């Protein structure tokens, strides 16, 4: 069963895809179950990924990167999803954390950090969410106060992806400008700064190979050149960067859905009941046909969003609509595919069972479905009448 042909990727991207696929088969798949039990991946996988050119592929040579484009990082994400991998979080590191530093970091900071993110020596995380504030980011309590030649950060973050492994964190904190006006600013904190510590590795219902942690900041002195961009402009920067983060969710959801669909097609052609293949029941055929239509639509939407992002044209509403649709589509696909596996679909050793649990978070992180609807609805309902 073929889906829509893709026109975005060049021969060079496809050759890279073969290389990434080999990496996934050799370096990820054989170890993934052990990582699920450990709730995280060892750091040496990151170094191997760096050696193989899998990290921050889009980053310019001037900033210490290989000078590729977003499509190379998309390939890495898709291939990890295709084998059902949930760790390591290369995608967040390369396409969410590194862009904040590359786009808003001062030259000295970029020089110290970015090339080491490309090599995998430094692992990145982004820390916005707190125990008391997730959707309502304006309400965060982590505070940064200027003290001489440093900012002093106090507070707590939770649910931070790559949190246990992270060496470099982009942290959102409350600040006041020189006039005492409050706002949110973004800082780069490194794990070796005194006063910084990591809490529990949080146990989730899915995505078990992904380390997700609490982070604590107790009088962490952060040098002034670790402030990203300007004081109190954190919200503006988040609004500029969030479309790409949400696009990443669309890419992952589409690739995961395609993988689950493929496993399920194979299963229903093997398994028999009432002397026929499960694939011969009209219910199965119609379910798979509907899911196929979803996957076609999903692929077209996903590739058009990637194309818009490549041109710098993907806006907040477009990215939110995509994230909403793809994450909900993955929910439908994993649920229907699990059902077609019967009781085996509920067993952890079946990929579809893991995919079902792994998928649930996609409707929550990087902005919940309700927040996506809120963003889209504002652009529909609060605009003046045409
Ligand atoms: C596995 C995992 C990984 C994560 N990784 C990261 C990370 O790397 N970095 C990071 O900073 N955060 C991360 N998060 C946090 C994630 O982004 C938040 O959990 C998410 O934004 C929701 O915030 P919350 O959990 O505080 O829920 P709340 O904001 O408390 O929401 C609870 C419910 O209320 C609804 N709600 C809230 N406001 C509205 C509204 N205005 N209208 C309608 N409904 C509303 C929500 O949609 C939700 O259903 C992660 C979370 C998980 C579980």
Image (cartoon, rainbow, N blue to C red):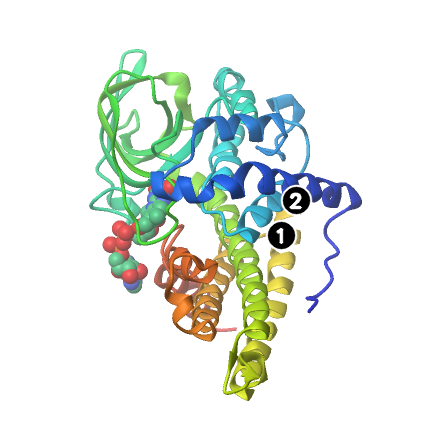
> What x and y, as percent, mark residue 284?
53, 81
Per the image, the residue denoted by label 2 is 71
x and y percent of residue 370 in the render? 35, 63
- First in sequence: mark 1 or mark 2? 2
What is the count of numbered marks?
A: 2
**Residue 25: quadrant of the picture:** top right
Q: Nearer the viewer, mark 1 or mark 2?
A: 2
Q: Marks 1 and 2: CB-CB under 8 Å? A: yes
Residue at figure coordinates x 58%, y 33% from the top left? 56
The quadrant of the picture occupied by the N terminus is bottom right
Is residue 229 visible from the viewing direction of this image? no
Question: Residue 157: in sight, yes or no?
Answer: yes
Query: Which residue has dot 1 on it?
Result: 306
Q: Residue 224, percent across and down? A: 37, 17
Q: Residue at x 42, y 67 (%)?
A: 345
Left or right placement of residue 271 versus residue 335 in this view: right
Kindly identify the residue that appears in the image at 60 percent across and 23 percent down. 63
Give the percent coordinates (x, y) of residue 356: 41, 62
Using the rendered view, name the quadrant where residue 285 is placed: bottom right
Q: Residues within 10 Å of mark 2 (few under 14, many from 20)?
A: some
| Dot 1 crowding, Cα within 10 Å, few <14, some 14–19, many 20+ | many
Q: Is residue 304 left or right of residue 198?
A: right
Along the line of sight, the residue nearer the viewer: 126 or 261: 261
Q: Is 86 placed above or below 373 here?
A: above
Give left or right: position of 150 versus 60.
Answer: left
Mark 1 to mark 2 CA distance (whole Å): 8 Å
Tell me which corner region of the image, top left, top right, bottom left or bottom right, holds residue 347: bottom left
Residue at the outermost front position:
275
């Amino acid at each position: 069963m073929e889906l829509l042909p893709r026109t975005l990727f060049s021969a060079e991207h496809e050759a890279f895809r073969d290389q990434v696929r080999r990496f996934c088969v050799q370096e990820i798949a054989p170890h993934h179950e052990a990582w699920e039990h450990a709730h995280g991946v060892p750091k040496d996988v990151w170094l191997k990924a760096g050696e193989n050119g899998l990290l921050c592929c889009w980053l310019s040579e001037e900033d210490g990167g290989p000078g590729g484009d977003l499509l190379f990082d998309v390939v890495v994400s898709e291939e990890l999803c295709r084998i059902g991998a949930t760790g390591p979080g290369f995608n967040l590191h390369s396409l969410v954390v590194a862009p904040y530093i590359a786009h808003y970091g001062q030259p000295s900071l970029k020089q110290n950090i970015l090339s080491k993110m490309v090599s995998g020596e430094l692992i990145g995380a982004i820390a916005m969410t707190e125990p008391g504030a997730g959707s309502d980011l304006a309400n965060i309590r982590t505070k940064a106060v200027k003290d001489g030649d440093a900012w002093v950060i106090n507070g707590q973050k939770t649910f931070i992806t790559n949190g246990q492994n992270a060496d470099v964190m982009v942290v959102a904190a409350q600040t006041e400008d020189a006039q005492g006006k409050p706002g949110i600013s973004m800082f780069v904190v490194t794990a070796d700064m005194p006063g910084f510590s990591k809490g529990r590795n949080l146990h989730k219902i899915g995505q078990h190979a992904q380390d997700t942690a609490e982070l604590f900041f107790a009088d962490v002195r952060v040098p002034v050149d670790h402030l990203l961009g300007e004081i109190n402009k954190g919200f503006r920067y988040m609004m500029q960067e969030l479309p790409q983060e949400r696009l990443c969710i669309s890419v992952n959801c589409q690739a995961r859905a395609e993988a689950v669909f493929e496993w399920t097609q194979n299963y229903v052609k093997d398994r028999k009941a009432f002397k026929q293949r499960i694939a011969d029941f009209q219910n199965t055929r119609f379910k798979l046909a509907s899911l196929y239509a979803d996957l076609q639509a999903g692929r077209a939407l996903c590739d058009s969003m990637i194309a818009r992002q490549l041109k710098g044209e993907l806006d907040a509403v477009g990215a939110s609509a995509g994230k909403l649709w793809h994450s909900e589509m993955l929910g439908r696909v994993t649920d229907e595919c699990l059902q077609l596996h019967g009781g085996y679909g509920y067993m952890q050793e079946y990929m579809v069972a893991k995919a079902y649990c792994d998928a649930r978070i996609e409707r929550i992180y990087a902005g919940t479905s309700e927040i996506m609807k809120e963003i889209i609805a504002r652009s529909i309902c609060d605009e003046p009448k045409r």
